[in-house]
Amino acid sequence: MKKIIYLAVFSFISLTSCAPAYFKDAKHFVKTNGDNLAVMFVSPGNNIVYTNHKPLEIKGFDTLSVSEKEIVLKENSDFLSQLDNSNVYELFINKFLVYFTKTGLNVYTQEFEEEFNKNENKLIIDIAQVEFDEYYDMVRDEKEYFGKLYHNETYINAFAINIWIDYIKNNNTKLLFATNRITDYHLGWFETGYYEGDIYYYEDNIEMKFEHIEYFLDHVAKRYAEYLYDYIMTDYVYQMQTISNTNVPDSITLHHSSGNNRIFIIGDDYKFIEIE
């Protein structure tokens, strides 16, 4: 069984009792696809960054240029070395577009810019940069026995997908950011022995493989498509609430669950955030 830790599990809070006006506007957005909103999806081109934060011992590394260091770090990585711009588009960017299109919005790509510009109600989603970040994370397990604290530190592989998006609407641009990561599976625990002073540490570890990264890329592509839809829907709700002079709580993001057609407030870790 493949056991990999995902640090982005949905946690929803229902709005049923506190903000019925949000439901009305959000449901109208879902029903009408944002009043027939047109969305231009702009791919990142070559703005794809591969960052290896794992320490390496390479002779002469300090004498290399910045670009040469980036190449060497990528070539000597566990997972980044198996990625390039071509398969990143295949495994992530194109899937992001496909999942985003499945939300029901009218999505255009740059090949159809002339047709897109015929719409009055429109916005542009420009993927400014995608970063794949490989690094070590440290997990600390601890437990107290007989008034003494015992601990163990284990370093595990971690791999993150960071994305920056320019959200362009009515000649106004906002910069959005999201991140998700995957790690090795790690389970550690302490147990006592027969004698009071015998304390043992046990662990169960499963290291990631590239097949887990491939699955993760697909998983995050779908998740970021949902994040994006949620942000656009929430932006619409704020606009409608402002027009009706309704007080809107700051910094909330609504989520539409397509499976049961319900609206929720989404937690801060499961959405795009605005960067000033």
Image: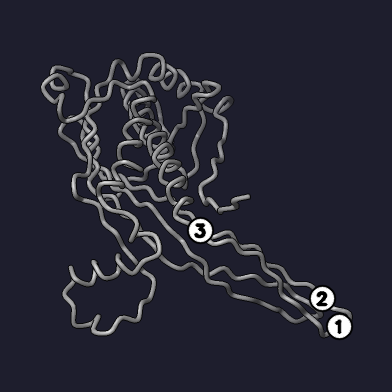
Mark 1 Cα-neighbour bin, 10 Å: few <14, some 14–19, many ≥20 = few
Q: Is residue 247 above or below residue 208?
A: above
Cα distance between the residues tagged 3 and 2? 30 Å
Q: Mark 2 falls on what kind of element? A: strand
Q: Nearer the viewer, mark 1 or mark 3?
A: 3
In the image, taking residue 268 as reference, residue 95 lies left or right, namely left
Q: Which mark is residue 208?
A: 3
| Alpha carbon distance from label 1 to label 2 | 7 Å
- On the image, the x and y values in percent for residue 28 come to 40, 16
Give the amino acid type for the residue marked by disc 1 in the picture: Glu
Q: Secondary structure at mark 3?
A: loop
Which of the 4 quarters of the picture holds residue 31?
top left
Q: Are marks 1 and 2 in contact (CB under 8 Å)?
A: yes
Residue 168 picture quarter:
top left
Closest to the observer, 239 or 228: 228
Residue identifier under label 1: 196
Q: Relative to 240, is 41 above or below? A: below
**Mark 3, other Cα within 10 Å: few <14 / some 14–19 / many ≥20:** many
Q: CA distance from mark 1 to mark 3?
A: 37 Å
Kind of residue sitting beneath label 3:
Met
Q: Which mark is residue 192?
A: 2
- Nearer the observer, disc 3 or disc 2? 3
Between 249 and 256, the one nearer to me in the picture: 256
Disc nearer the start of the sequence (1/3): 1
State which quadrant residue 99 falls in: top left
> Could you say whether the residue bearing mark 1 is in a helix, strand or loop?
loop
Counting from the top left corner in percent of width and height, residue 186 is at 61, 62
Residue at 37% of width from left, 26% of height from top?
237
